[in-house]
Image (cartoon, grey):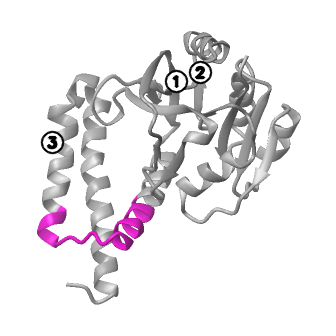
Amino acid sequence: MNSLAILILTKNEEINIVDVVRNAKKCTDEVVVIDSGSTDRTVELAKAEGAHVAYRAWDDDFAAQRNFALEQTTADWVLYLDADERLNDDLIAAIHQVLEDSDMGAQYAITRKSVAFDVTFSHGVLDPDHVRRMFPRTTVRWVHKVHEHPECELPEKRLSGYIEHHTYRDWKEWEEKLCLYTTIWAEDAYKRGKRTSMGGIFLHSIGGFFKMFVLRKGFLDGAIGSYLCCTHFFYTMLKYLKLHELQRKHGDR
C-alpha cells in the first residue's frame, strides 16, 4: 500500500485541532501540522494526538505554507486538510482505495460542503465546491498568496464522499476572516499589476452580489443565504477599495 501524509495548516486552532487530527488518523498515521505561531494550545494538543508539528512563520502567503508542508514528509501521497474540515466515512473509504491501488497517475478533487451558523449550505456564497486536495507528493506546487491553488499536470479524478467544512462559527469569525482575506488579496493583486477605479469597485461589487444571489441561487438557502449574498457585495467592495487605496498610496492613477 502507498503511504499518505495528511497536511494541516494551523494558527490558534485549539477548538478544532483534536477533532481534525483524530479524523485524519482514520486515513493514515502520518499527520503533519504546519503551525504559524499559535499562542493557544494548538501545538500541545496536536502533539498529544500524535501529529508531527513543524513551524513556519506566517508571512501572509498561504501557498508558501502549503509548499513548506510538502517538505516535511516523504510519503507517496499528500492530502491537504484545513483545521475546520472533516472527512466523511465514504471519503475515508475512497482514500483507502486509492492508497491500495498502485496507480499514481492522477490528482483527486473532493466535494466540500460548507456549514456555517449551524446551517449546511447548498447554494450561493457557500454552495458546495470541488477542491483538489490529494496528489502524488512530487507532482504538485501551490501558487498565489490568498485563494491559493495547486498546479499539477496529472489528470483530475473525483473521490466519492465529501469534506464537511465548518467555515464560520459566528459573525465575529466571519468579520475576522473578511479583514484578513481582503487585505491579503489587495496586496497580492497590486503586486501582480491589477488596478481598479471607483467605478470599477462598484461594478465588481454589484457583479459579485448578482453572481451569488441569482446565478448561484443564494436565495434558495433562505434568509441567511440571502444575507450572505449581501455580505459578498461588501466583501468584494472592500477588497477592491483596499486595492484602490494601495494605488493611491503609491501614486498610481
Front residue of this view, candidates 225 and 180: 180
Look at the numbered discs 2 and 1 and tell me whether their residues touch, using CB distance below 8 Å: yes
Q: Residue furthest bottom?
A: 251
Residue to which mark 2 is pinned: 87
Residue 18 placed where, x, y %?
75, 31
Front residue of this view, candidates 222 and 21: 21
Q: Say if 206 sits above or below 253 in the image.
A: above
Residue 115 placed where, x, y %?
46, 27
Q: Residues within 10 Å of mark 1 (few under 14, many from 20)?
A: many
Q: Earlier in the sequence, mark 3 or mark 2?
A: 2
- Residue type for callout 1: Ile
Main SS of residues in magenta: helix
Residue 37 placement, left or right of 231: right
Residue 196 placement, left or right of 16: left
Q: Residue 197 is drawn in which quadrant? A: bottom left
Q: Say if 119 sits above or below 124 in the image.
A: above
Marks 3 and 2, how far apart at CA: 32 Å
Q: Earlier in the sequence, mark 3 or mark 1?
A: 1
Question: Which of the numbered marks, if any, corresponds to residue 163?
Answer: 1
Q: Residues within 10 Å of mark 2 (few under 14, many from 20)?
A: many
Question: Which of the numbered marks, if any, corresponds to residue 210?
Answer: 3
Quadrant containing the C terminus is: bottom left
Residue 108 placed where, x, y %?
49, 26
Q: Which of labels 3 and 2 is toward the front?
A: 2
> In the rendered structure, which segment of residues is drawn in magenta?
182-201
Marks 2 and 1, how far apart at CA: 5 Å
